[in-house]
Structure formats: structure tokens, C-alpha cells
Image: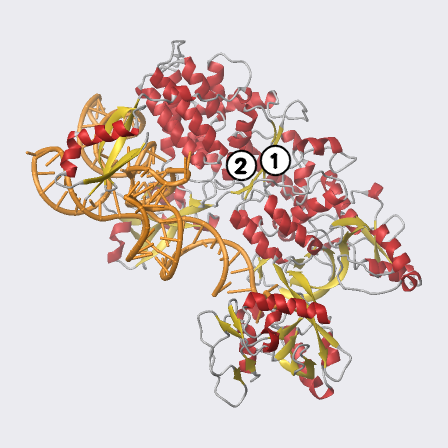
Amino acid sequence: MDYNFKEIENKWQKFWNENKVYKVDVDKERPKFYVLDMFPYPSGAGLHVGHPLGYIASDIYSRYKRSNGFNVLHPMGYDAFGLPAEQYAIQTGQHPAITTEKNIKRYREQLDKIGFSYDWDREVRTSDPKYYKWTQWAFQQMFKHYYCNKDEKAKPIAELEEIFSKTGTEGLDVACTEKLEFTAEEWNSKSHKEQQEILLNYRLAYLADTMVNWCPALGTVLANDEIKDGVSIRGGHPVEQKKMRQWLLRVSAYAKRLLDGLETLEWTDSLKEIQRNWIGRSEGADMIFKVADSDVEMKIFTTRADTIFGVTFMVLAPESELVPQLTKPEHKEEVEAYLKETKKRTERERMSDVKKVTGVFTGSYAVNPLSGEKIPVWISDYVLAGYGTGAIMAVPAHDTRDFAFARHFDLPITQVVVPEGEDEPEVTFWEKGSECPWEDAKDSKAGYMINSDFLNGLSVPEAIEKTKEYIKEKGIGEVTVNYRLRDAIFSRQRYWGEPFPVYYKDGLPYMLDESELPLELPEVDKFLPTEDGDPPLGRAKNWVTKEGYPLELSTMPGFAGSSAYYLRYMDPHNDEALVSREANEYWQDVDLYIGGTEHATGHLIYSRYWNKFLYDIGVVVKDEPFRKLINQGMIQGRSNFVYRIKGTNKFVSYNLKKDYDVTPIHVDVNIVHNDILDIEAFRNWNPEYKDAEFILEDGKYVCGHAVEKMSKSMFNVVNPDDIIEQYGADTLRLYEMFLGPLEQSKPWDTQGIDGVHKFLRKTVKLFFDKDGKLIVTDEKATPDELRTLHRTIKKITSDIERFSFNTCVSAFMICVNELTDLKCHKREILEPLSVILAPFAPHLSEELWHALGHEGTVCDAQWPKWEEKFLIESTVTYPVSFNGKMRFKIDLPADMDTKAIEEAVLAHEQAKKWIGDKTVRKVIVVPRKIVNVVIG
RNA sequence: GCCCGAGUGGUGGAAUUGGUAGACACGCAGGACUUAAAAUCCUGUGGCCAUUGUGGCCGUGCGGGUUCAAGUCCCGCCUCGGGUACCA
């Protein structure tokens, strides 16, 4: 029978749909399993062949789990707010909701063709008011909570107000923007407005004046993870620093828990490492340096307090609040000029000339708390205001940046660590006027201390310990931990996002009442900023509350809607809560999450933060949202080239091009087969090539190729619809898996797809003859057939468990090849085979399952168990090596003991040849594996 | 610079705890069927040498090491990919 995949796939997709085969509900009788795909942004280009890779893998795993008796939640939805639809709206005037709807429709059509087991009744869209009601709600909850460091937990802001009114900030240990100090009396005597201003310092969602990444081309602020190399990831536009009043989320409050939580997760080490680096924990000390002839104190953060005797100057960030206090009148002009200069430099410029050393002296001197020495205080933009305290102690002998700065401004250098493996040099101090003995800062991770008073002779770790103790004792500092993780800027000056449920009264923000949620996105005449530079929402009519108070004009960023979508899938139609207690207690968390690694520092940090907050306020039962996470690799494009001889319309074949001066030109991969150009199709492809001439080799035009990003401009986009049209969805599914390990990036090359398609046809042939008649018999299976089947069940089961889907496909091919050779058409073998094939090729398996006489879906068939008894063989073929080199094979009984094996091997005719006149020194026998004879 | 990860035939890749390197597929070559082509089926296919046949040597980025045995473990390098970058 012909393998009529079109008919089969249409038939069963219809069946699944009509019978709601993939609908799931809470079922306390069965264990749950939650498999999630990172939901897509529905772009105008539609899906290419790289997108479904992860979806196919998760679908296989979902079906496998279902067959093993689990109640599997496997939903899909759309991350529907976003810049491209809005940029398109700006250009064309078409409302982004319309564009988005259209794109979603196309995505859905494409997804449906692949045969996924999604429960579409649970679909969510982040741009749906019913959905974003809960995004807005969560934001309001963050506004209403603060973070208590002692209990490591979010708490209601009302509790903080009570603390303030009773004891002020005395003994307070909470997350805040700025450390404030006031008494209860002071708090109680403040006006309501003043109190509200102060509370913003503590709220988890707060409004603050902050330096932001402003992208003029997009007209909006961007978060750190939305920028790379100083330009926006979306569109590649330049970004500059600007101070603006913005909403922020106090993600930094959760830094410790976000870091510690990683230990409990089954994520790849590399992904955990990326998150660890992003969170950036460093242990060190805050130390106080007094300023000479002044009451001012400088607080600095250092991880190397032990090098304090090597400090020869101090540096402040230009933005530091201490700058005006420490600038002496005679240096004022110079300092102000420098500050003006640094402000002008955008982030991008700062990056492009990293090596350029700039700075200015304040005129002040600080006093080293240990040595009592007076050292100059400088200002330089190599010190960041946002990290630590915005001030450092400089140890030029052991820090590259400090060293460069010292050399540039001729500041003295004192070596305090002799690195491991080096001898103590004669000269350990340098100052202006003599030749500098060093070319660069010396490594100081390991070694011993010199020029350091009571630390002299100690090893580096000992010295760190001793200094910490010392500064604690003397009260000149405290041991602290610093995190690199910044609070997330949460405002975007754009239209197509969630409106903030916020209004303003007397310049202060207030939350709308929960009953007024969702606050729906208003209509605007244009999707551009207003003439006054307000965001697009400034164009909306009546964008005010019932009482007439103005509403917030910014909208929320992309990560807002994706931060809790996995919770909403558990209970997608609930109007009373983000997720009901019952649904959340049943589904708990995501057991398996599959998606791209590009979300490592964005979505995967924010949603962990979001989830932890919801956990703190009792909305969800799990502290971490994604227990196991797999990053699927990228599918790259495989481009093809033709070579045009310069100045002509003549093209020369790949292996002949070296004799000509040619320009390589991308050619559509869809008109190239196995690197051979379809010349007719090429002439029709572009009018420019209508009259093209060719220099052929062996009568063919051979194209060149290269692996590049899959994109329209490279003409290497392969559309899953085209593959399905030609080979069917089951072939597409198998081939995507067959390409290689899931986590690995690999180029898409349609060559080779024939192999898996042939495999499916061969499978069909085990069931039907060439007239389409079922030839399956009820005959008893032979040991060989049973061994093939059970070996395959074992291999497939264990390979699915370790997400090795490519080897599964090979195992199926081996199985079908063997059964074909055995001419096996027995139900006893073929029925279990159709069940284990179902996760990979669900359409064909469903067809075969029904052909075998079953009524219900193959999805609910019990996963077969392999039995070891069928795998046992009576003889083992031992490879026999001599000095580690395999020379011949010998068949021996499986239960033969070591001694007998040794004798049998040595008695073998071939063994004599290899031993020759040499002596047998040793014989190693690994039962059922190998024999190695050591001769010499 | 720092931190991860990876280098295996012409190609994608396999080898799960150190135990027959190259499974499975693509491609290529030869053959069968066919008027022909497509499809299908069969055979061969890491390199080098030798050959009537049996065969031999080399071989998992490079150089060392551990081991009876190394693609797999250890040390040093090279190349590519990813992350991050004035983070004190």
C-alpha cells in the first residue's frame, strides 16, 4: 500500500479535534505531569522549520508520559504584546491587535498541521484583557508589599507603616533603594505625601528617578537584557543613558533566593552558570575611610580587604553623592568640566574606548583606617555608581584598572602580595620620578603578604580572614555581600503593552481598585509619542479615572506578560483569581520546560522572581516555577550560492569557479536539491536571471553552501508547511529529531529527509501488502522477533527518559529493518511497536492502531514494558584483543566462567598466530564484554 | 580578559559506567528491474599500503601522561561556538 500521509494525517487530526483527545482536567486519581514550551511571539514571518524543534521534543515527552498513566498538562499560547506589531502599526496605521490576530491565526494553522497534543482550550494570549488583568493585579500586589531581609520574604506594606509609626527605622533590615534613617516621631509628624514618597523607597514595585537605557529610535526605555553591545536587541538601535522617572521591580531583593534556588533545579550547568554570573554575588567588606580635615566619611566596598596596605588612592564614581562634598574649591571648575564630559558619553562610547583612562582629582584626602596614611581622592567613570557604594579603594599593584589609572596620573604603587611561584622582588614600591618596574598589575589570588604590617607573611586567604576580623573588631567596616543584579525597569514608553493600573494625585502614584481591573488599553489616533514627548497613551481621550485623575502613560515591558503565564494555563478562564488554589495544588509547577537559551537572563530570571513573590504572598505553592529545563539548540540555515562571473550574466559551477573572477550570490535553497541547481526554476526565480547562461560540470550546476542564520535575506528559510506538503507531518517530526541531539545547534539540511520518510513507508509495509490489505497475523512470535521488539522498547524508553530523541529514531529504523528481514507481520510484535512509535509519529501510529482493530486513541494505550528474559542470548560474541587491539571474534556460551573463557581464547587457532613466539603475560576477561590478551 | 561548552568519515551523527570507533541515515559508486526515467531492491563505501585471496599499518583537533585497554580520565596547547565584561 502507498503510504498516503495526507489522508492519514487529515483523518486523525480531525478525529483528535472532534473527540477532544487532548483536553485535560484536574484528576486527583492520576499523577500530574506538566510539560511546557516557551510560548512564541507570533511574528509576521510565520514559523520556520527551526521553531517546532522544541515543540516536537516536548510533544514526544508529553505523549510518552500520558501513555505511562500521567495526567499531562501540555498547553500553548502566545506572547502577543511586542515591538514588531507596534512598529508595523506606526508604519501602516494598522492596529497592532489586528496584526497580532492575523499572525496568531497563521501560527495556529501551522502548529495544527504538525499534530501537537496541545489542549487548546487552555490557550492564553498576553494581550487579552482577561489575561492581563492578572498581570496588572500582580503588579499591584508588588506595589503593596516590601521585602523583609530577616525573614527573606515579601510582606504587606501596611506592616512596614506600622513599624515606622512605632519604632522608625531602628533595627530595620529590609530591601530599599536608599538607606534612610528616621525615628517614629519623625515619621508620625510627616505629611501623607511625604510618607508616600518614603514608602516608594521600600515597595517591590516602585517609582524612582533612575538612569535608564533610553533608545531614541524606538522612543522607549529598555531593560539591560534587551540591549547587547550598546544597541537594542530588537532593531539594533543605539541606546543612551538618561535620567527618568520610571517604574521598577525590586528584583534585587530576591538576589539571594534567586541564586540559592538554582541549586534545587535540574537545569543545565551552563544555564545555571549564566544566571549565577548575572546575579553576580560577591563577598567582601564595606569599609569606612574618614576624610582628612572633614567630618565626611567614605564608604567603599571591596572583596580584597587584605590588600588595604596597598591602597594608594581612592576613586569615586562621577554620579556619587560625595562628589560635591569632597570637591575643594580650587578643583571645582575641573571637576565640573569632567562630570559634564562623562555625562555626554553614551554607554556605547564608553564601551568602544574601554582602554581610555580619564579622571580628575577632588583635592580631598582620605585616611587609611589601618595605616593612617593620607591618600588622594579622585573621580573616574571606571567606577560605577550602581555597584557597591559607588566608591573604591584603589590597589594599583594588584588591579588592572587601578594600575592603568595610577600609571596615567603618576600615582604611587605599593606591592602587598608576592604571587605564588614568584620571589619577593627588591623593589616593591614605585612613585613618580623613577622608572616603573611593572608592566601590569600583579596577580594576587594566591601568594603571601608583604608591606602589610600585621598581615606580613600570611597567605592570601589567611590575610582575608584576619582583616575581616580586624575591621569588625575596630568598627571600621562590616562584612557584606554584594549582588550585580539590578532592579528591573518596568516602564516602556510604548502603546502595545499592558497599561499600568495606576493613577496620579498630587504627583503621587495610587493603585486603581481591584474591581476596576483590567484597565483596558485605550484607542489612540496614532501609535507615536505626543508632540510634548509623552508616550502614545498621551493621545488617548479621557485617559483618566472616574474621578478625573490622570492615568499612567507608560505600558509594561514584554517580560510582564510572560512572567506568570505557566500559572494561568493551570486555570485559564478563572475570573476570580490568577489561579485557583485547587488547580495550583494539583498542577504545582512545570515538570519539564523546553525553550531557547536566549531567555537565560531575561524571562527565566523575571519569572522566577515573579513566582517567588507570588509564593511569598500565598498565591502559589511552589517556590520555583520550572523544575527541569532543557534548552533546545538553534536550527541554523544552510545557504546555497551561485557564482556569477563579474560583469556578465554567466554563472559558473562550484568546482570550476576558481578559474574565474566571480561574485557569490545567495540562491533560494528551495530551488536547489542536493546542491544541484534547478536551472529552469532559477531562471523563473528572478527576472534578472531570465537569460542567465551557465558553465556546467558533468552537465550539472553545483552550488556552494554555507551555514548561516536562517533568515529571509539569505534565502535559506525552510517552511514546515512545505515539508509537510511533500512528506507529511510525521516525517517532519521524525526528521527534526533525527538531525541530532536536542540541545545542540545544527543546520537544517533537507537532504536526508528521504531516509526517515522511507522508514515510515517500510513500517507501513509490515502491516499492509501492496494492495492495502492488512497482513497482520495472530501467529506466535519467535525468539528473534521478541528480542528485536524488547530491545527496541528498552532502548526507546530509556532514550526518551534522557531526551535522546535522535537515537530513538535510529533504534526504530534498526527495529523495522530487522522485522522486515524476519518477514514479521505478527500482532504480538507490531501492536506494541505502534504504541512506542506513537509519540514520534502520532498520525501513522493512530492509523495502525485502528487498523489493528482498536476503537480509542493510541494516546491512551499503555506503554509496553520490556522483559529482560527476551533479551538474554545463549552465546556472546567476544571481541579478542591483543595488547588492546581487536584481532578476532569468538562465540562462547553466555554462562561460561572467566577461566574457561581464557582457555577457549588461548586455544583458538587465530590466537596462536598473534601470540607467535611472545609470552602471554596476562589475560583480562570482562564477562559478556571483551577479552584482552597481554603479550610481550 | 574572565566563565562555560564543543572538536569523530564527503555530510548529519552513534558509541549511556574506560571495554569491538564510525551504529543509523544522507551522499557517492556499482548492479537488478525498466524502451527510458522515477520509484523500489541488492552490493560496496574512514585513510593509506598490499593483494588471487588471507591481510597489514594509521586513525576520534594537536602534544604528552595514566591504564591490560582512552573518542571517553589527567596535564599542556590550538580552533570554533555561547555567556559576560570597567562589577572593585
Helix, strand or loop at disc 2? helix
- In this view, the residue in front, A125 or A103, is A125
Chain under callout 2: A
Amino acid of disc 1: Met
- The answer to whether residue A791 is above or below residue A174 is above
Amino acid of disc 2: Tyr
Pointer 2 and pointer 1: residues touching (CB < 8 Å)?
yes
Residue located 68% across and 70% down the image:
A471
- The answer to whether residue A526 is above or below residue A805 is below
Residue occupied by mark 2:
A55
In which quadrant of the rendered view does residue A739 lie? top left
Task: Give the class, few, some or many, for how many residues have Cα within 10 Å of label 1's Cα (few <14, many ≥20).
Answer: many
Chain under callout 1: A
Distance Cα–Cα, label 2 vs label 1: 10 Å
Label located before the other in sequence (2 or 1) = 2
Give percent across and percent down for residue A625. Answer: 65, 41
In which quadrant of the rendered view does residue A902 lie? top left
Give percent across and percent down for residue A168. Answer: 87, 60
Residue located 61% across and 38% down the image:
A104
Helix, strand or loop at disc 1? loop
- The answer to whether residue A620 is above or below residue A89 is above
The scheme the figure's colours follow is secondary structure
Numbered tag placed on residue A173 in the rendering: none
Residue occupied by mark 1:
A76
Q: Quadrant of the N terminus of chain A?
A: top left
Residue A94 visible somewhere in the drawing: no
Left or right placement of residue A929 versus residue A804 in this view: left
Q: Quadrant of the C terminus of chain A?
A: top left
Give percent across and percent down for residue A21. Answer: 59, 23
